[in-house]
Amino acid sequence: MNQENDSLQLARRAGELALDKKGFDVRILMLSEVSSICDYFVIVSGSADVHVKAIADEIYNGLAREGIKPSYREGVQEGNWVLLDYIDVVVHVFHEPTRQFYSLEKLWGDAPVVQLSEPEPAGRSDGNKS
């Protein structure tokens, strides 16, 4: 398996763990198509600061059980925006009003969106295959 597939699996796993804690509006942006920052952003919302912390903890602990720990973690105390940096995948867990304010999806609007259940990024095309 190549690095991008590993990164995609990690991004999807983080999204699934977020959903397990009732995170909502989970989006995976394929940044590798538009930037060298990382391969994927996982963006998820929580309904309150305590919910954001619970989602972030579920992702952190769930991936740690699988032997994957972030290189950096920020915002856990505040709970408005928790960032978990897994180098190739960066997870952003937002309190919904904070997510709307920073609007990462608009900032990175040219990045393809990957659905949790799809094998390929949505909207991606290989051209005309006739």
Image (cartoon, grey):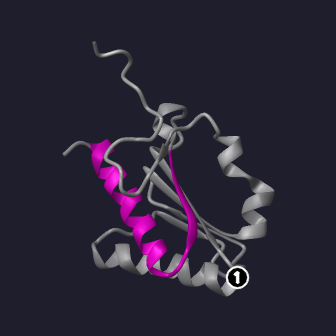
Tell me where residue 2 appears, x and y as whole percent.
Answer: 23, 42
Q: Residue furthest left?
A: 1
Which region shows up in magenta?
3-29
Q: Is residue 24 left or right of residue 117?
A: right
Q: In the displayed structure, would residue 84 be above or below residue 59?
A: above
**Left or right position of 24 against 1:** right
Name the residue nearer the viewer: 35 or 18. 18
Residue ID at (70%, 44%): 106
Please state the total of marks drawn on the protein image. Answer: 1
State whether the magenta stretch is mostly helix, strand or loop: helix
Which residue corresponds to the image point at 32% horizontal and 56% vertical from the top-left? 9
Q: Is residue 20 magenta?
A: yes
Q: What residue is shown at x 45% (from left), y 41% (from top)?
A: 122
Give the vertical position of 59 relative to 31 (above or below).
below
User: Secondary structure beneath disc 1?
Assistant: helix
Q: Tell which of 115 and 87 is nearer to you.
A: 115
Q: Position of residue 126 (x, y in %)?
A: 36, 22
Quadrant of the image containing the C terminus: top left
Q: Local crowd at mark 1 within 10 Å, few (<14), some, or many (≥20)? A: some
- Residue 62, by quadrant, is bottom left
Image spot of residue 49 (x, y percent): 70, 82
Q: Nearer the viewer, residue 63 or 14?
A: 14
| Place of residue 8 in the rendered image (x, y in percent of width and height, measured from the top left) | 36, 50
Residue farthest front in this picture: 130
Mark 1: amino acid:
Asp
Residue corresponding to mark 1 = 49
Q: Is residue 101 magenta?
A: no
Query: Residue visible at 62% across and 83% down?
Result: 51
Q: Is residue 36 left or right of residue 130?
A: right
105 up-or-down from 21: above or below: above
